[in-house]
Image (spheres, rainbow, N blue to C red):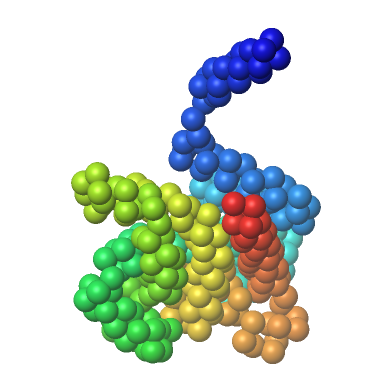
Amino acid sequence: MEEIATEIEQLDHTDSNLDTLPETTDSSGAVIGFQVIAREFTKDKLAMFSLGLLIVLLLVIFIGSYVGFDQSEVMRVQILKRYAAPGAEYLLGADEGGRDVFGQLFIGARNSIIIGFSVTILTGIIGIGLGIISGYYGGIIDNILMRIVDFIMVLPINMIIIVFVSIVPTYNMFTFVLIMSAFSWVGKARIFRSRTLSESERDYVNASKTLGTSDLKIMFREVMPNLSSLIIVNSTLNFAGNIGIETGLSFLGFGLPPSTPSLGTLIGFATSPDVIENKTWVWLPASILILVLMLSINYVGQALQRAADSKQRLG
């Protein structure tokens, strides 16, 4: 009898301890998920080096372009200094208009990064929002939105952007961002629609509907946080892609106006055999910079993708 009484006391003591344990909440689960992603990301030494290099480049580019150079002065044409070689006056020489290549490199990199980031944010807002709405509601709303997405995806997007840039009488960086964003959100919408379809069938969504929570709160306060890892990975990789698109269009002459520096504009000088062979200071620094930027962003994005996959496997 004494042994039975002792076991009962132990069970009561265990139950009291269980009552004092903290409850697991969704917010703590989200924090643990980000901790898993951060832990897996830090294991990738190349990704950590790429992230550090990217941060340093961004700081140098933005601080240097705003503090050290005046765009109107950099873009002032000086014919007598045409293709001036690198020296004391021009650290990286001058282009065919006698303009400072070093200043154009800083300002052009800043403009390309701003355009890539702005397009990523705008397309993210449109694509993620419509994707979540389409996947959450399904039915006729899903069919209408996806048919619009399918129609836009079969169009030659780059050619349409070139046409719009050509027909707009006066355009600037803001107009160029809007033109690029108008057709670049469809891929995001399809990706997030498919993920939302699976999320909308989970128990927490059904419980929220039962409690009478509004659809907007369910979509953007409950479903979207569970897509945060996908949002980060997709946005990072799209950031690099948008910089590449802007650079390519500027290289072809359909990007920013001639009065606005861009990395693509500097690389575009490499269409002449004489410039390619004898005046490498005009195009080579911009080519190396865009290569380093793209590789760094892609390495970071791929490492985030692997970390997000590890979080999904670990639950």
Q: Can residue 150 be seen in this view?
A: yes
| Picture residue at 64% right of the left edge, 88% below the top | 272
Q: Picture coordinates of residue 243 (x, y %)?
A: 53, 68
Residue drawn at point x = 68 percent, y = 66 percent: 295
Q: In this view, does 57 lie to the left or right of 260?
A: right
Rendered position, 2 above or below 35: above
For this orientation, the residue located farthest to the top is 2
Nearer to the camera, 237 or 67:
237
Residue at image location 31% in from the left, 78% down from the top: 146
Judged left or right of residue 185, residue 212 is left
Q: In which quarter of the image is residue 297?
A: bottom right
Counting labels gives 0
Quadrant location, the N terminus? top right
Left or right? Give the position of 122 relative to 22: left
**Which residue is nearer to you in this view: 273 or 76?**
273
Foreground residue, 148 or 101? Answer: 148
Whether residue 203 is situated above or below residue 146 in the rendered picture = above
Residue 159 falls in image quadrant: bottom left
Q: Which residue lies furthest to the right in this view?
A: 45
Q: Residue 93 in the image: x percent, y percent?
A: 68, 66
Asked if residue 164 can be seen in this view, the reply is: no
Where residue 218 sits: x, y (%)?
Answer: 30, 51
On the picture, is 107 further left or further right than 188?
right
Residue at left offset 40%, top offset 73%: 190
- Position of residue 181 measured from the top left corner of the image (x, y, whole percent): 37, 70
